[in-house]
């Protein structure tokens, strides 16, 4: 079964279209904060982020992901076993880079090709054993199990594993090389020849003894190139050709060229000098073996390397969900509805960022719906009453659900959006040229150029300027445009007059996204952080707070009168 296009993120032959979140949405939804909480490894964080911010509204793909993630969450053993395989896959990826390096010697390439194949066999075997031992339900993991089983059975892995170990053992018997070095008139190394491959290391004491003996003769030179006298210190193995590496010709020579030492390729000044000699002698044997190894690894091996970011993505989010569950907060698998419905029904939804905090805190949950009777919300309430938290919670719930991750809610059924656009207050430095109102208007125009009726728009205190009339004028037109386009949206604002004039906007503007007023509550002067559908409560909020802190006229008058009476 071909594996080139296999993925745990989308079904085979998927036609899903992906759209990347804008930089503003990435920032406003705190994507980096989430990725940093998922992993301390920079490679993992970056790979998770790239997968997270490219979303699709394809219903089949989202269901596929939801099922795969559920398996990862249900089976800690699956995650533990696959983490071990990931270490092997990482080695395989590093070795893949060796194969592309033309500076490495034939011996080095051969050893690394054997290491590559050994790691590949271990990866396939490990994935196969893990998936056979666990009752996975998702199409993605069932398909993966089928693929690795077919590769394992068709490639004769048990015999291949044995052959690899024996071949590596033979190669690793080479412990030293005897060289002959020619000098020029200035006694500089001019050329080097390979005398023999040996199955024992040179001994330091033997070398030192020979050097001292030579020095004591005050420069006496050996009048031949006979090396037999050295064999007691570094015995040559007469059966070197039995390594399967080919015989080394006595006196084969190569000019020395200086190169920088490299731990990655095995290159150093001496091995570079030997490179052509060894390559010429071993070329046929090494190339034949590499061709045989390619039959086993080929593209299929590197396909599993491509699964590394996907496996990490699911594992890290599963670990996060376990931590949140341990705090007693609800999480659920989202149910995917038809995209055309543009709906969402969430029970006990909350902002996942609150649950990710290390300190314990009471988290307020809310019910939240998009449907034919309410698709755009104008959200009002007191300062620090939870408006931004709720707005962000909706965006994060969609982002997680469309990536297949459990959502922070007791239940959620939703129609996927094609993208999430956010409009939060800009940095003061970005408003110097256009002014805040001009800069925010420009960004809103850019959003409407990209958004469709399937998009989700999240506006946070947009168009809030010192000139309330100007901000309100533009805000009304923005809300009309959202209704006309047909988007789902949350617009949280302090402009209560905007929320009071919704009947007029609904009746005068064409569109099927009905605008509704939502408020964050205050109970007995305390912010409840609960949201509910109601007209803006500006006056009643002020009354509750005034009553709590004793700043109504009646209470102040009573206090003054009491002082006078004293």
Image (cartoon, helix red, strand yellow):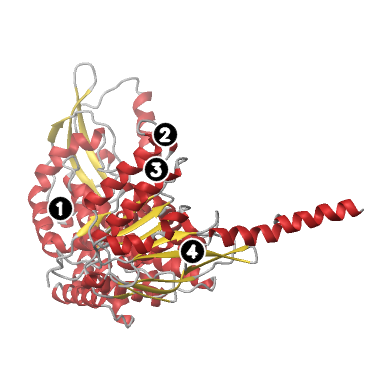
| CA–CA distance in space, label 1 to label 3 | 83 Å
Nearer to us of marks 1 and 2 is 2
Q: Earlier in the sequence, mark 4 or mark 3?
A: 3
| Left or right: residue 407 compared with residue 268 | right
The numbered dot on residue 368 is: none
- Position of residue 327 measured from the top left corner of the image (x, y, whole percent): 54, 70
Q: Are marks 2 and 4 in contact (CB under 8 Å)?
A: no
**Depth check, front residue: 446 or 545:** 545
Residue labelled with disc 2: 429
Q: Which residue corresponds to mark 3?
A: 470
* Point 35% across, 47% down: residue: 474
Q: Which residue is mark 4?
A: 519
First in residue order: circle 4 vs circle 1:
1
Q: Secondary structure at mark 1?
A: loop
Occupied quadrant, residue 425: top left
Q: How many marks?
A: 4
Q: CA distance from mark 4 to mark 3?
A: 23 Å
Quadrant, the N terminus? bottom left
x%, y% of residue 560?
A: 82, 52
């Amino acid at each position: 079964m071909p594996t080139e296009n296999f993925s745990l993120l989308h079904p085979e032959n998927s036609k899903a279209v992906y759209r990347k979140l804008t930089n503003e949405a990435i920032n406003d939804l705190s994507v980096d904060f989430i990725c940093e909480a998922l992993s301390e490894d920079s490679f993992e964080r970056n790979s998770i982020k790239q997968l997270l911010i490219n979303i699709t509204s394809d219903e089949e793909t989202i269901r596929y992901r939801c099922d795969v993630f559920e398996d990862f969450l249900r089976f800690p053993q699956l995650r533990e076993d696959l983490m071990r395989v990931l270490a092997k896959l990482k080695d395989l990826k590093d070795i893949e880079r060796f194969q592309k390096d033309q500076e490495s010697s034939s011996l080095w390439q051969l050893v690394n090709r054997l290491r590559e194949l050994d790691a590949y066999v271990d990866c396939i075997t490990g994935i196969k054993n893990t998936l056979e031992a666990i009752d996975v339900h998702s199409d993605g993991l069932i398909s993966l199990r089928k693929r690795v089983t077919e590769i394992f059975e068709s490639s004769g892995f048990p015999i291949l594993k044995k052959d690899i170990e024996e071949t590596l053992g033979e190669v690793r018997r080479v412990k030293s090389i005897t060289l002959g070095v020619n000098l020029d008139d200035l006694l500089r190394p001019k050329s080097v020849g390979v005398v023999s491959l040996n199955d024992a290391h040179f001994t330091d004491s033997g070398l030192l003894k020979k050097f001292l003996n030579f020095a004591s003769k005050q420069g006496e030179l050996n009048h031949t190139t006979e090396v037999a006298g050295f064999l007691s210190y570094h015995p040559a193995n007469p059966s070197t050709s039995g390594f399967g590496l080919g015989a080394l010709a006595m006196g084969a020579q190569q000019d020395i060229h200086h190169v920088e030492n490299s731990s990655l390729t095995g290159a150093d000044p001496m091995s570079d000098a030997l490179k052509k000699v060894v390559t010429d002698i071993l070329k046929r044997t090494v190339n034949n073996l590499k061709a045989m190894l390619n039959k086993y690894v080929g593209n299929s091996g590197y396909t599993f390397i491509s699964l590394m970011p996907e496996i990490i993505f699911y594992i890290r989010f599963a670990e996060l969900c376990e931590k949140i569950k341990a705090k007693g907060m609800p999480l659920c698998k989202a149910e995917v509805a038809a995209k055309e419905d543009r709906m969402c029904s969430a029970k006990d939804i909350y902002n996942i960022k609150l649950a990710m905090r290390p300190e314990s805190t009471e988290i307020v949950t809310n019910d939240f719906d998009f449907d034919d009777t309410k698709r755009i919300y104008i959200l009002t309430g007191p300062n620090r009453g939870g408006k931004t938290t709720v707005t962000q919670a909706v965006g994060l719930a969609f982002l997680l659900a469309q990536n297949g991750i459990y959502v922070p809610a007791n239940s959620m059924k939703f129609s996927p959006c094609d993208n999430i656009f956010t409009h939060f207050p800009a940095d003061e430095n970005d408003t110097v040229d256009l002014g805040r109102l001009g800069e925010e208007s420009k960004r809103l125009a850019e959003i409407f150029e990209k958004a469709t009726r399937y998009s989700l728009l999240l506006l946070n205190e947009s168009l809030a300027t010192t000139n309330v009339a100007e901000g309100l004028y533009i805000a009304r037109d923005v809300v009309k445009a959202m209704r006309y386009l047909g988007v789902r949206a949350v617009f949280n604002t302090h402009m209560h007059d905007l929320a009071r004039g919704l009947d007029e906007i609904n009746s005068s503007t064409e569109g099927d996204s009905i605008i509704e007023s939502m408020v964050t509550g205050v109970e007995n002067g305390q912010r409840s952080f609960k949201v509910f559908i109601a007209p803006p409560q500006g006056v009643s909020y002020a009354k509750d707070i005034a009553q709590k802190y004793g700043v109504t006229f009646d209470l102040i008058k009573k206090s003054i009168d009491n002082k006078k009476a004293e």
